[in-house]
Each structure stands twice: as C-alpha cells, then as structure tokens.
Amino acid sequence: MFDVIVIGAGPAGLSVGSELARSKRVLILDGKSSIEDCTKSWFIPASLVEGNDEVLPFMTKGINRLLCSTASGKDTVWETSLPGGYYYVDEHAILKFWGEKALDRGAEIILETYYTDHVTKEDRVVVETTKGRFEAKLLIDASGHDSQVKKNYKTDENYYWWSVYGAIVEHPNGLHGMENGDYMLWQTFKDTQAGDDVTLEGGRPVFEYEVLTENSSFPLILYLRKSKVQKDLMRTEFKHVLYNEDRTSQFKDAVIKEEKWGWYPSGDLTVKQAEDRVDFIGDAGCWTTPCGWGFGFIVYNYKHYAKSIEELLDKDRLDEASLKGMIQFNINEKHQILMDAIASHFLANGTPEQLDKFIDFFNNNEPLMCEKIFTLTISQEEIRGVAKEFVKFFNPLELLSIYPKEDWNLLLKEIPYFLADTIGEAVAKTKKADIGFKPAFDISDNKAYE
C-alpha cells in the first residue's frame, strides 16, 4: 500500500509528489504519455520564487513593457516597474525536473493511466484506474479543472472561469515593431462580438501576447465567464484574431510551433476543500487567485503544503476536518485577494467604454498600482489611495451597476477593511436608494447585518 496516490502529473501533482517522495511511498498517475507534456505556459511575478533555488534554473527574466489596445482606439504603453519583475517559465523542463526528482526519491509514476473511481475506507482509499486497483492512506487529486474525483462529491464552484487558447509561435521575419519583453495585456476588436457593449463575461474575447525572445512569442485569447468556453470555439477565434485582424498584422507570418489551451478557476479567497482521506490541489483545489497566477500559487506553496501533509500522515490524521484545518498556504493578505477579485470581476462585466475608463484611470494615476493589484502586492494604504482616486472615475452606484447582484457582497464587504471614509459614506448612501439589495456590512460601525 502507498502512503499517497496523486492523480495528475501536472505542476501541482509533480511538485507536491516529488516533495512527499522524500519520506513517503508515493504513486503518481496521469493519462498523458510523457511526463513533460503540458498544454499550458506561464509567467509569474519573480517574488513568488524568491529563495526557491530548485526552480530558478527554469525561469527566464521577461516583460519590460505593458500594452493595451482596445477596439475603440485606446492605446497605452507602460514601462513595467514591479519590484523584481517577472519570469517566463520553461514548462516542459520544470515538469521533467519534478518528475525525475520524484523517481529519484523512490516514487512510482504510471502514465497513460486514467482514474475511474475510488472508495474511502476507514484506514485507506482504494483507487480504481484503467490499469488496475491501487491503495493508499491518502488520495491527492491534482487532475485539473475537470476533475473526475470531485464529481463524486457535492462541491460549490460558484466562481468565474478563465478559458484560454493560444500558441507558441516563431517570427521568421522579425517582430514587426514588437519588442522582446512586451506583454500585451488587453487588446480587443470590433468584429469579435455581437455588439459594441458586449462584455468579457458576455462573450467578448481578449487578445494577449508575450514576446519571449527576438523571434518567438506566445499570443493567446482568453475569456472570463461564469462558464467554460469550448476548445474548438476558442481555437477558431484565436486563428481569426491571429491571421485576419488588421490590428494584429505583426502575426501574419507567424509560424505556430505548439498550441496551448486550458481552463482555470477565478475565485476570491481560496476554497478549502477536502474529504476524508481525499485532498484537492492545483486547479482541482482552486489553487489560484482571481486573475490567475495558478502556477505561481503552486510554486509558492508546494513545499509548505507537502510538509503539512507529511505531518498529518505521520499522525494518521487524514479526516476531512484535519485536511481542511491544516495550515496549507503562504497566502496573500485578504485585502489583496479581494481587491484582485473586485478588479477581475470589473474586467469581466464592464462594457468596452467602462474598460477604457479603467485604462484611463491608471494612465492618469500610477500604472504601478495596476501591476500591484493584479500581482496581489498592493498594501492597504495604497488601496486607500487608489480608491480615493477611483471614485473620481466611477461613483459607487455606477460600480454597482457594472457588477452582477451575486458580486455586490464581494464589493461591499471590502469597505470596512480598506476603503476611505468618503467612499464608505458614499456607498452607505446607496442603502437608502431603491436598488434592491442590502449591504453586507454597516459602514458606520463596521458591524455585519444580521
């Protein structure tokens, strides 16, 4: 019998499995045929891997400029100034490294194998697969967004989904005006939606690209919606944007080398989910932040998580309460995660005109604050400063009109934590307006309504 069975040999499963194999008997199962296979590609803030020497060889410094270009003609270029900058990740090499590390430590890895079912007993979990039955003290599900393990349980997944499709491409005739280190973080087009007011959540795709080297880049399209977008639909739209849009002419002669795609959740505070002798990590466990950074979340936490699991294994405390109760993560401050969620949901639900105003806000203030919001490094004091200026562009009632009703509580519950008094007073006035909702907190005394 194994100590741990890990379903999934992606970054979450391999990183955690390789750590656990140091002292535990580990089995890693995956349906893919090669350990380094990966349909995703990542870049992360450099601060997330500071001090982690084993992963640094797989990181390359990237991103010097941030660009925006909207369908209405709003073009912006910011020089990135985030302390430490960003890294591109060599996804194939780092997966191979973690897989070899796990094997060197005694783990078993069986590929081309699919999970079919499991049964939890008092002292173990019995896992059924396409290559037979295996038993372990603990089952860790790292199988991704479409987890078959989770489908055995009732789970509340009331969050948005990022749907992404792109490709690593080569530019045989140069970058055509792009620069090495460019990151187009927001580009939209008039002919990729039914009308001018279609939102991201309503179906409008956003085009992004990262220039990786002097002759290669990673262009992609993404959607942020309450449901996942089908792969074939994304692929068709991506090819249209890449080769047929006038404003992406720099890609007309690009040669696709490797197509990439994926889906990942965008929650607010990380969901802690576990069952008796079953835990969930990576996308299956909502290891992400509202705007993404799923790989960053993994690389920042896998060592700490594995150590916590080792301790529970040693004590044989693998019940649901113990798994949920362990200190798992080096997490960002609550105000950082919720501010990121507010901004991400704004991007999903704002009209193109409102998103242009959002870009104007940072053009007229400090673009670094935009980076800090979406990398979850902004301080409470900085949020207060941003909020004071933000209401000059969007009054509270306008903000509430942008968000769907299910997001109102997300917006309002932050006010007692970091918003300036003047904003709190302004939002408090909306309680008297006939807009059909009750705020989560009393702004005047910071007490929750009963």
Image (cartoon, rainbow, N blue to C red):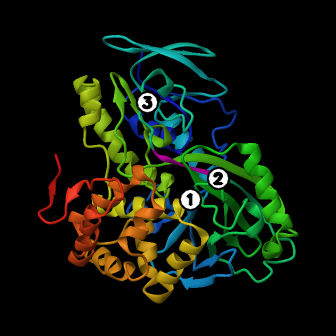
- Residue 47 seen by the camera: no
Q: Which mark is residue 426?
A: none
Q: Nearer the viewer, mark 1 or mark 3?
A: 3
Q: Residues within 10 Å of mark 3 (few under 14, many from 20)?
A: many
Which quadrant does the N terminus fall into? top left
Q: What residue span does the magenta drawing correspond to?
A: 159-164
Q: Residues within 10 Å of mark 2 (few under 14, many from 20)?
A: many
Where is mark 1, residue-wise?
Answer: 58
Q: Report helix, strand or loop for mark 1.
A: helix
Q: Nearer the viewer, mark 2 or mark 3?
A: 2
Q: Residue at x 25, y 69 (%)?
A: 429
Instruction: Where is residue 320? Give x, y as percent.
Output: 29, 26
State which quadrant residue 352 falls in. bottom right
Q: Which mark is residue 140?
A: 3
The residues tagged by marks 2 and 1 sit, at their Cα atoms, a distance apart of 23 Å
**Amino acid, disc 3:** Ile
Q: Of the residues under marks 2 and 1, which one precedes in the sequence? A: 1
